[in-house]
Image: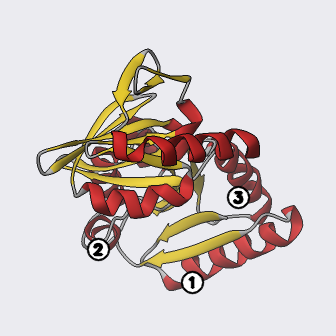
Amino acid sequence: MITIAIVEDEEAYAKQLTEYIEKYQRESGKSIRVIRFSDGDEIVEKYTGKYDIILMDIQMKFMDGMSAAEAIRKQDTKVVIMFITNMTNYAIRGYEVDAMDYVLKPVSYFAFSQKLDRAIKRIPHKAGNPVIVNTADGIVRTDTSSIYYIESEGHNLIYHTTDGEIKERAKMQDAEEKFVPLGFFRSNKGYLVNLEYVDGVKDGCCIIKGEALLISRARRNDFMTALTQYMGEH
């Protein structure tokens, strides 16, 4: 499902955009969920990183769309932002926050549907299950298929991913409950490994991208059973 946030303080325009999205959904067959915010400060304050596309008005009462987009970009570099405005000069500034495009008011359905189609194609491909990681710098969105393994370090978790390391203040026990149903296995006290990336087992360790991660003696049989089952299913 595609999640779209509409950030618009004018009720009439918000309603029109919602109706356009519903029409687009019927025509395209895509499943879309719409979440409405009435001002820029509202989406920034409640930002969760679960949106695929943000339709952002630029002129709003408490926080303008440009400021809201700048705040969101500090937390989320992947969400697709498209401005809705009647002021072209402001819209052009949208490229400073990596906005995909802008739609001029009054909005016609044809123009909107074309741009929405482009925006949907820009959504990062989700090969596995989307994951939101809360770091000290903000929210990072990744995917289970991008995680090699998760390492416990004190009161933090280190996500070793295809894009580098991500650190989150969290407990391994909570991560285990969340990720084991998604194809991960806790090989020992400090590692939660993605079975998809296990290249082999050698000397009591599982090999992931050239790294040898210890499998505890107590978990060795269960690990081999889980790995064999996973390989059989995939």
Inter-mark Cα distance, 2 to 1: 16 Å
> Callout 2: 10 Å neighbours few (<14), some, many (20+)?
few
> Residue 44: x, y in percent?
29, 64
Badge 1: few (under 14), some or many (20 or more) residues near its Cα, within 10 Å?
few
Residue appearing at x 22%, y 57% in the figure: 170
120 or 217, nearer to the observer: 217
Displayed quadrant of residue 7 = bottom left
Tag shown at residue 12? 1
- Above or below residue 25? Residue 149 is above
Neighbour class for label 3 at 10 Å: few (<14), some, many (≥20)? some
Q: Amino acid at mark 3?
A: Phe
Q: Residue furthest top?
A: 210
Q: Secondary structure at mark 3?
A: helix
Q: What separation in Å lies between label 3 and label 1 (alpha carbons)?
A: 16 Å
Name the residue type under label 2.
Lys
First-in-chain label (3 vs 1) = 1
The answer to whether residue 100 of the structure is visible from this angle is: no
Name the mark on residue 112.
3
Relative to 150, is 113 above or below? Answer: below
Which residue occupies the extreme left position in the image? 154
Q: Which residue matches tag 2?
A: 61
